[in-house]
Image (cartoon, grey):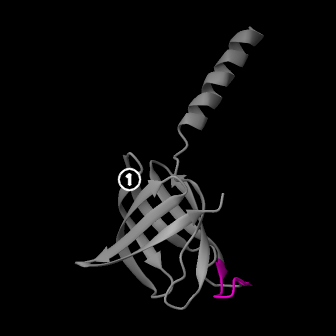
Amino acid sequence: MNKIWAGLFGVVMAAGAAGADPVTGTWKTQPGDDGNYAFVEITTCGTNICGTMAQAYDAKGKAVDSAADGKPMIWDMKSKGNGTYRGGKIWAPDRDKTYNSRMTLSGSTLEVEGCVLFICRGQTWTRVK
């Protein structure tokens, strides 16, 4: 009986690990208009991808206390397979604006783009962990 439980436990654990999305983790943004950047923690939220600002840094790399720490930056993003994500929103703290967003994962880089109507801006984020 113990072998059956151990086997079931192993199957459940393997399924959980296989279900982790490759984009989850901590990402460093490029500097914004103000020269500041942030670490963003990306996780799964149900069947979607979301991200929150984990820590803000000034242009010199010094951690700063920010009211935006813990604030959602990415929400409702859907994986479309092959490292592409669409349909979500992204908040840009340097302009305090929310954009329709898409992301493309390639190794340790994440291309993030946000658009309002036909005006788009993007960044390349790098994986921290």
| Depth order, front residue of 110/56 | 110
Side of 100 where 26 appears, left or right? right
Query: Which residues are drawn in magenta?
Result: 56-63
Read off the residue under disc 1.
84
What amino acid is labelled 1 in the image? Thr
Query: What is the x, y in percent for residue 60?
Result: 69, 87
The C terminus, quarter of image: bottom right
Residue 92 is covered by the magenta coloring: no
**Secondary structure that dominates the magenta span:** loop
Side of 38 where 103 appears, left or right? left
| Depth order, front residue of 108/10 | 108
The N terminus, quarter of image: top right
Residue 69 versus residue 23 in the image, above or below: below
Report crowding for label 1: few under 14, some 14 to 19, many 20 or more residues within 10 A (C-alpha).
some
Outermost residue to the right: 2
Query: What is the x, y in percent for residue 62?
Result: 73, 84
Query: What is the x, y in percent for residue 107?
Result: 52, 52
Residue depicted at x 41% and y 58%: 104
Outermost residue to the top: 1
